[in-house]
Amino acid sequence: MPIASTDQDCLNDSVKPGTVKKRVETAIYGYVYCALTGDLAKIGITSDPDRRRRQLETASGRKLDGFESFHVYAPGAAERCLHARWDFLRTEGEWFTWGGLVYDDICSYMRTRQNRA
């Protein structure tokens, strides 16, 4: 069941119900993922988690230490919410230090919301 990005602790999404968009940032449904490599975690969105995992592994030249994805409503809004939650640990773009802590918290946070939806 998709996660609603309109939980009290997330940003309100700007996607109107019934709107069809092609970009993941503005799509009605998509995936939020968290990737872990060493002491860094990456928070992103994708329409194809398996392909994104392969891309990240190819770009880094090594297997990821962890990768989880969550099917969500308004993935762009859900991603912005998670970025804001961990902004104080941001290193560059969508990468965050203290990777294990960020990764574990995001996976736990998203699983909780997935079970509520």
Image: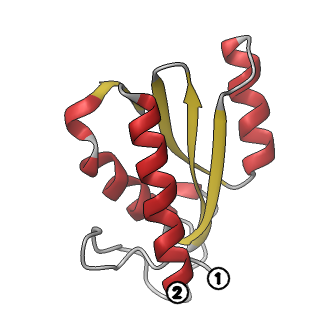
Q: In this view, does 90 lie above or below 105?
A: above
Q: In this view, does 107 lie above or below 100?
A: below
Q: Is residue 77 in sight in this rendering?
A: yes
Residue at x-position 47% and y-position 46% = 104
Lateral position of residue 16 relative to residue 61, left or right: left
- The answer to whether marks 1 and 2 mark residues whose Cβ atoms lie closer than 8 Å is yes
Residue at x-position 46% and y-position 33% = 100
Amino acid type indicated by mark 1: Met
Disc 1 marks which residue?
1
Front-lying residue, 12 or 88: 88
**C-alpha distance separating marks 1 and 2:** 6 Å
**Image coordinates for residue 42, horizontal then vertical, percent:** 49, 34
Residue at x-position 56% and y-position 67% = 27
Lateral position of residue 24 relative to residue 82, left or right: right
**Image coordinates for residue 62, horizontal then vertical, percent:** 73, 15
Q: In which quarter of the image is residue 91?
A: top left
**Image coordinates for residue 24, horizontal then vertical, percent:** 58, 57
Tell me which numbered mark, 1 or 2, is placed earlier along the sequence.
1
Lateral position of residue 74 relative to residue 48, left or right: left
Q: In which quarter of the image is the N terminus?
A: bottom right
Residue lying furthest top: 61
Lateral position of residue 21 relative to residue 15, left or right: right
Amino acid type indicated by mark 2: Ala
Q: In this view, does 8 lie above or below 98?
A: below
Front-lying residue, 44 or 112: 112
SS label for mark 2: loop
